[in-house]
Image: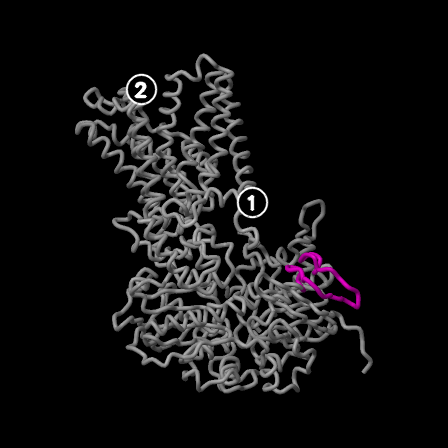
Amino acid sequence: MTEVDPATHASPAEEAVAGRPGAPGRSWGWGRVGEARHLGLVAALVLLAVVGLVTRPDNFATSSNLVSILALASTIGVITVGMTFVIIGGGIDLSVGAVMALASVWATTLATQSYGPVVMVVCAVLVGTGAGLVSGFLIAYGRMVPFIATLAMLVAARGLAQRMSGQRTQLVQAGNTAIVELSTTRVLGLPLLVYVFAAVVAAGWVLLNRTTFGRRTFAVGGNPEAARLAGIDVRRHTMVLYALSGLCCGIAAVLIMARTTTGSSTHGDLYELDAIAAVIIGGTLLTGGRGSIIGSILGLLIFTVITNLFILNGLNTSDQLVAKGLIIVVAVLLQRRSLRTST
Amino acid sequence: MAEEQPLLRVQGIVKQFPGVRALDGVDLEVRAGEVHCLLGQNGAGKSTLIKILSGAVQPDAGAVLVDGRAVRLSSPTAAMAAGIATIYQELDLVDGLSVADNIFLGHERAAGGFVRRREAHRAAAALLGRLGHAEIRPGLEVGRLAPAGKQIVSMARALSREARLIIMDEPSAALAHDEVANLFRVIRELTAQGVAVIYISHRLEEIRQIGDRVTVLKDGRTVAVGMPARETATSSIVALMTGRNVEYVFPPRGSAELGAEVLRVEGLSVPGRVADVSFGVRAGEIVGLAGLVGSGRSEIVEAVYGARRASGRVLVEGRPVRRGGTVGAVRAGMGLAPEERKAQALLLDDSVAGNITLASLGRYSRWGWLDRRAEAAEARRLAESLDIRPPDVRRAIRTLSGGNQQKAVLARWLVEGRRLLLLDEPTRGVDVGARAELYALIRRLADEGVGVLLVSSEVPEVLGLADRVLVIREGRLVHEAPAADLDEHTVLDLVMVSAGGHAAGGDTAGGGTGVGPGPAGGGGHDDGDAEISSEGAFHD
């Protein structure tokens, strides 16, 4: 971090957002920086919506299309919440897609399914959390680089999922359709899995912004040495962060089972890249110590809407990938500029 | 003797950092072929001067002349082009590259982008031979060399750039006794070839041995230029280093009765750094640890805090502290203000409040749920009580001055039940006015019954602030006395002169501990790296 001239401590904009001197509560902390930064993301999302309305006036704004955007975003969205924690804590989790696949396979084996839908959900969540715990243990106590440890978990989890399923897609059995109802049952026009997504986002936001755990996550990612010397158990905290990411993968596995009615070792391919990209577009520092859940979700929605626009307009999916790549670059460049001007 | 043109002339260099005037009119004159020693206490401005000469930092005023011509050392490259090379304490070599690759790093012997290996190896061998170390193979990976060997490679690199002036910052700090003798031989070979050396060391006996002339810095000014290194009396050098214009204002010592012992340390040892140190700190007492950088004083503090592996016993109020981490130390009632404020203490992206409450979040929370109102109120109360300025705790901590940042770090530990504060260089990078405030604050804390263990490189600070002083040299506790019974002279003597005060020349028997920084393990190389570095290590 660069030295800052004391004379230019805070820009007027920042002061204005901070507002209300002496007011308790939300007047200091992460909220104000985040809110100011999210304006750009919201603007981008609005811009994309305008593009959608102009190019496909008949299809884009329909309720079925908007619902499908949200349903599509839900699975990766849950994973993105966990990923945000890991990245703010100074790490990275490449294994999310594979762990989700493993959890979906484990939960849909005939043996598991024989116990009913509740056990399937518990199984998916436990498998995800367990895988995260293993990665976290290797990173925190085995002193492995997060990139390597989670890369190993990616490969191993994918392999284990293939082994368990014999590389066959496992259908959710007729007796366990309660899981599928997450996708088919609608409340106020939205499928239940969107509510699950919303609940995970809300829980993640609260955990990050309103608890000691969240505050310590910022500290561990921002300056692990300072955190350690302040008496925080940095290793245990790091391990818990990966377990949390695994937990999110387990929940995501339930959602993907609901959407596809299957468990498969091919689920979640390259989800890790989408999740990481969403987190970065959302303004979370890849080096840790700064970031927000809201930003990540906005980043993910931008990605999902782009995909949707390309499909609606019948454009090439390869071009869509190029567009996504460009958006990552532009988002990071813009953030760097706004950071420089605001400090 | 006719006044010949000096190789390097530095005139009236001024360098202002935010809140601190690091250099305030420094003059220096170095002749070709001499070893010029630069002396001064910590904070005197030596490192800033080196940074200016190596092009890393730009002066605000003053001139640097090489061969009588003014040069602008706008970057490290420009300094090298002017013939000035710097060998830093932490050698800037790439461990994974070979000796030859390191020597020619940045100016590779290459044709069309391809390194000419054979030619580079030949040239590297020639340079190493010139330094009397032809036995270091140019193809060897640098990481496999011992510190002494790495230093030779650094010197060869300087020579490869055709350096005419080599600045060596505490080159002997990482070396064992016999390796220092070898270093001196190499330096003499260099000077015989007309290369000038600026030699920085805290060890006066080394300066007598290798130095030709001495320049003394104090509080950013030159107080003596070009004194003969061998003839000038030690006492007058020490007097030059210590007499100061800046008078610190220390609070009066507490007259109150000292309480029971809050900290007891028994037989504390850190392999290669600290040997068998025992002491205690009582409630309401400030105990100062005096010693050079690298003497083991910071290691003692870190070991007490559980931030560094060590053997021995640490007890707080008679109860042993759970080892193996800082969590146990904090739970036992310790708090640490570490040496490197930015790297080890602050969350630079966070607000003042977030930094203050970092270690006590549990107090403002129930089942992990933060009561942010209580947290903010407590942060505001502490900021007010410590007079942190500006008084807005929502402000980003990075915008505060060093002194106010340090207050925030202290505030972090000012919660109930804190029994012992470990302060490592609490006034580093803090300007004079804010220092007095910090001193008063530390004394106030002690008067409130907290035990304080204070580490400082600045002897006057230890003497002025502490009740009792422990002198650490080469990892051992060599002296203990009430601060009132000591003066700066005595402490500097104890701190700098090797045991017995012998002139280093091979008689390890007299000194016992030798010249190396570590009391154990002979050379005192850094931690575990020494074992693998034996192959190809140079040794005479």
Q: Quadrant of residue B446?
A: bottom left
Residue B316 spot, x, y in % from top left: 29, 70
Q: In which quarter of the image is residue A104?
A: top left
| SS of the residue under disc 1 | helix
Specify whether residue A254 is painted magenta. no
Chain label for disc 1: A
Residue B76 spot, x, y in % from top left: 67, 58
Foreground pick, B122 / A49: A49
Look at the image and tell me in which quarter the N terminus of chain B lies. bottom right
User: Which residue is located at x 37 percent, y 20 percent?
Assistant: A68
Query: How is colour applied across the structure in the image?
Result: one colour
Query: Which residue, given by chain and number where applicable, does mark 2 sit on?
Result: A189
Foreground pick, B290 / B442: B442
Left/right placement of residue A163 relative to residue B189 reads: left
Q: Is residue B473 above or below residue A20?
A: below
Q: In this view, does B501 lie above or below A137?
A: below
Residue that extends furthest to the left in the rendered view of this protein:
A115
Magenta segment range?
Answer: B53-79
Query: Which residue, given by chain and number where applicable, does mark 1 sit on?
Result: A340
Mark 2 belongs to which amino acid?
Answer: Gly
Left/right placement of residue A31 relative to residue B435 reads: left
Residue A39 spot, x, y in % from top left: 48, 34
Left/right placement of residue A220 relative to residue B187 reads: left
Whichever of callouts 1 and 2 sits on the residue coming sooner in the sequence is 2
Residue that extends furthest to the top in the rendered view of this protein:
A58
